[in-house]
Amino acid sequence: MNHRFIPLSVPNLKGNERNYVNEAIDMEWVSTGGAFIDRFENAVKAYVRSEGAVACQSGTAGLHLSMLLCGVGSDDAVIVPTLTFIAAVNPVRYVGAEPIFMDCDESLCMDPEKLKEYCETCCKFLDGKLIDASGRHIKAVLVVHVFGNLADLEMICDIAEQYHLKVIEDATEALGSYYLSGRFAGKFAGTIGNVGVYSFNGNKIVTSGGGGMIVSQDMELLNHAKHLSTQAKSDDVYYSHDMVGYNYRMTNLQAAVGLAQLEQIEDFIDRKKQNYCCYLEHEINLIPFRKEIRPNYWFYAYLSNNRDKLIQHCTEQNIQVRPVWQLIHTTTPYLNSTNFKIERALYYYDRIVCLPCSSNLCVDDIARVVQIVKEQERLSL
Amino acid sequence: MNHRFIPLSVPNLKGNERNYVNEAIDMEWVSTGGAFIDRFENAVKAYVRSEGAVACQSGTAGLHLSMLLCGVGSDDAVIVPTLTFIAAVNPVRYVGAEPIFMDCDESLCMDPEKLKEYCETCCKFLDGKLIDASGRHIKAVLVVHVFGNLADLEMICDIAEQYHLKVIEDATEALGSYYLSGRFAGKFAGTIGNVGVYSFNGNKIVTSGGGGMIVSQDMELLNHAKHLSTQAKSDDVYYSHDMVGYNYRMTNLQAAVGLAQLEQIEDFIDRKKQNYCCYLEHEINLIPFRKEIRPNYWFYAYLSNNRDKLIQHCTEQNIQVRPVWQLIHTTTPYLNSTNFKIERALYYYDRIVCLPCSSNLCVDDIARVVQIVKEQERLSL
């Protein structure tokens, strides 16, 4: 019997996407100018309560700009997690800097205890600068809110303050997640560090086809982001340019889709929460989100002792699942980079299988995933 | 009396754009995978008769990838024109290399005589490598086909062959232009050098909102371009990555627009040719395109001895015109770069005023532009 393909995480475009995109086409405003870009920026800004928001071409582009905004340059260093998508770390290299890889805690996000230990035991703090063993100035820490969970930003921000590190929040997977308690109660992922970045890639909780957004409480920094994303053009008539810029601005067409999607985000989160709970009710033990947060329930991480067999079986059964990303410190381009006491990430890498989590997943889909997963796990006992 | 605004160069989206975009949304395929990407790539490949085509996020992204494909890296050098949009040159810096600025000939494209003179008199050719005065290895020459005109590629390719330089064709403004005679008769802009790049930005002859395309006769090089544009992912299940890659892939939504636009390109070129001729009939002396080519008539360059006054007057009359780009060797980020005998570019920079050239420009629009231009030019006599 051939079952319908159940994808891992696909877009759900049943709101105003078609209307807005048609409006953009009818107005013949589809490129890097147009009303939907402003509307989408304002909508994100209002939703996450940041001072401002600058739309760009992708989450990667946003992270690249963030490196520049935080003054990271040639031969500097940035502390990054090893357990994340490589797009988070490549921007460190784009600006000629080197990453230093950290382990995760049980939230899958950066372990603040190890971050502290690394700063205390492996670096020197000289003239207000944190210097690593090879003499590089560590300018920033890049925190990824993995799978929609939230990192322990209270502790990380304290460490960053102590060692004069900028905090870049990679909130590409965590739009909509916020803290419920503690110092940052009510604050959304992306709005706490010096700069935060969202992604609207096709697999994210809301999509603009491809796209990203930079948020911050620092308007000067955001204005600079916009300048850099539009080829650093300093004069609109005479095409003067005061620095090396980028073609990183979001298009009106992307923004039209993104705006329509953002209108539905709380509905998507509700559905993803229901589906998450549905898996749990079927005794599929997904890694929990932190208790002190409202997550966006983006990705569902299941722990298996037979990862590869389970992935193979699901694939054969037309169910799309995947392991977590290959740990970045073990990928070819970063084999020679520094890493510090990576242990938990290895444990999770060996075991995580991400299960289907699209917001348009129905209970029958979940029941079938549960059946196939349990079937394979029994075989592997 | 308030006249309707006449823009310089805006999209014309009256073909299948709406249908294709709606199809992409209805299928919920809007991100970096989907049938329109393949269809658009195949359509461009067939139109320009290249071996293959790889769609990407922008012309700038395509040029950045081209630098990497041609092996340009840290401390290398690339010969570039000074009279072009800065997006053509910034990718040289993205890869850590230095540009060397050349003058233009009467086509506004790179002057091959000066290129030859520079290579002969300012460089050394050692062990098959062209080395500049500061010891940098000159790896490539970046040729821009300015305004849809074509560079003298016969001579430039000969020089490149002699000195082992890769030829990168920046055909971002010249999709549809081809040679009518000579060694490259029948060949389209972008398909002659080692690699060619098109742009589908909103102001180009066809648009995909934002977007670009890399073409080449070398499939291995194109496969590498695709790999680099998708974060260099070497394994789809396990997310392995064998090098530092980029998020530069075009989205299905962009491709849907681009495909619909490409279907109309010959019609657009016909209309732009008619409009170009219409200006000439009104005795507005636009810079001619080369006789031995079929241009795409993208931009209309008028020479004025009163550039700034003319721009001001047109702007006041609600007509959008612009000077040519500030010469790149005079912009802040490139003030310290090498430049060689730049003369003609200065002449053109002082005089060019680009007049409205959208494909949906009507004869009444042209008549009004002509009237306003003549009015101001008489005043300035």
Image (cartoon, coloured by chain):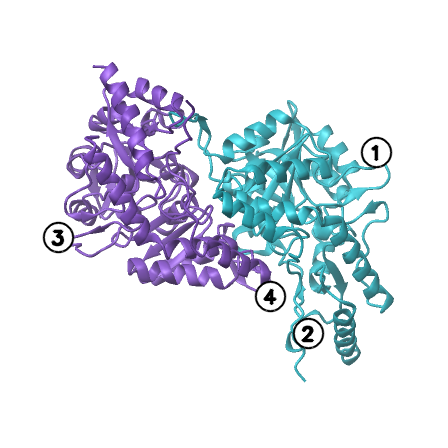
Chain colours: A cyan, B purple
Between the residue at mark 4 and the residue at mark 3, the CA separation in whole angstroms equals: 50 Å
- Disc 1 and disc 2 on one polypeptide chain: yes
Disc number at residue B182? 3
Host chain of mark 3: B
Q: Secondary structure at mark 3?
A: loop
Nearer to us of marks 3 and 1 is 3
- The residue that disc 4 covers is B237
Q: Nearer the viewer, residue B228 or A45?
A: A45
Between the residue at mark 4 and the residue at mark 1, the CA separation in whole angstroms equals: 39 Å
Q: Amino acid at mark 4?
A: Val
Horizontal side of residue B225 vs A302, given as left or right: left
- The residue that disc 2 covers is A314
Host chain of mark 2: A
Host chain of mark 4: B
Q: Quadrant of residue A275?
A: bottom right
* Residue beneath the point at 75% across and 44% down: A151
Q: x and y percent of residue A351 in the render?
A: 73, 64
| CB-based contact (under 8 Å), mark 3 and mark 1 | no
Host chain of mark 1: A
| CB-based contact (under 8 Å), mark 4 and mark 3 | no
* Residue beneath the point at 71% across and 36% down: A46
Nearer to us of marks 2 and 3 is 3
Q: Of marks 1 and 2, which one's residue comes earlier in the chain?
A: 1
- The residue that disc 1 covers is A183
